[in-house]
Image: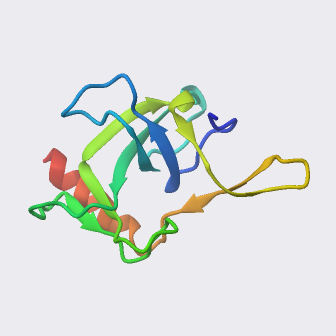
Amino acid sequence: MPIPYVPAQWEVLKCDFGGLRAPELNKPRPVVVVSRAFASRRKLCTVVALSTTAPKVVERFNYQLTRKPLATEADVWAKGDMIMAVARFRLSGYWFEKDARGTRCYERIFIHADDRPRIREAILAALV
């Protein structure tokens, strides 16, 4: 279900990239929002893909997070070369339980401050 709010910078969400074709991102996957919320751009945000699969060859645009934002034993990698502006309808949150009425209880997850500068560096390494 799409999120009903403008996501915050550094928030971790799920993004459905359905409709795109390989080698583009083309399946649901975790992402981190890297753009700030702009009043004139409420329906769109810029995201970077996250992955629990280590790259075959680690490049400057790959960054292994030091603090895992997802409930996983696997390492989490930011893929600075996979940056995209997406519509909010593609984004959904992470839920951890259902309340007494059966409604999902969502948790807002954020990238730790220690990892943010390195994700920025990974993005820049992919662009310059």
Q: Is residue 68 above or below residue 38?
A: below
Count of number-bearing discs: 0
Q: Residue at x 35, y 48 (%)?
A: 49
Quadrant assignment, res 27: top left
Residue 67 percent across, percent down from the top left: 43, 76
Asked if one can make out residue 34 in the rendered structure from this viewpoint, the answer is: no
Q: Residue at x 30, y 67 (%)?
A: 118
Residue 92 percent across, percent down from the top left: 58, 41
Asked if one can make out residue 87 in the rendered structure from this viewpoint, the answer is: yes
Taking depth in this image into account, of 30 and 123 the one nearest to the observer is: 30
Residue 19 percent across, percent down from the top left: 36, 22
Q: Is residue 54 above or below residue 94?
A: below
Quadrant assignment, res 121: bottom left
Answer left or right for 107 relative to 82: right
Q: Is residue 61 above or below residue 39?
A: below
Q: Residue at x 29, y 36 (%)?
A: 25
Residue 58 percent across, percent down from the top left: 13, 64
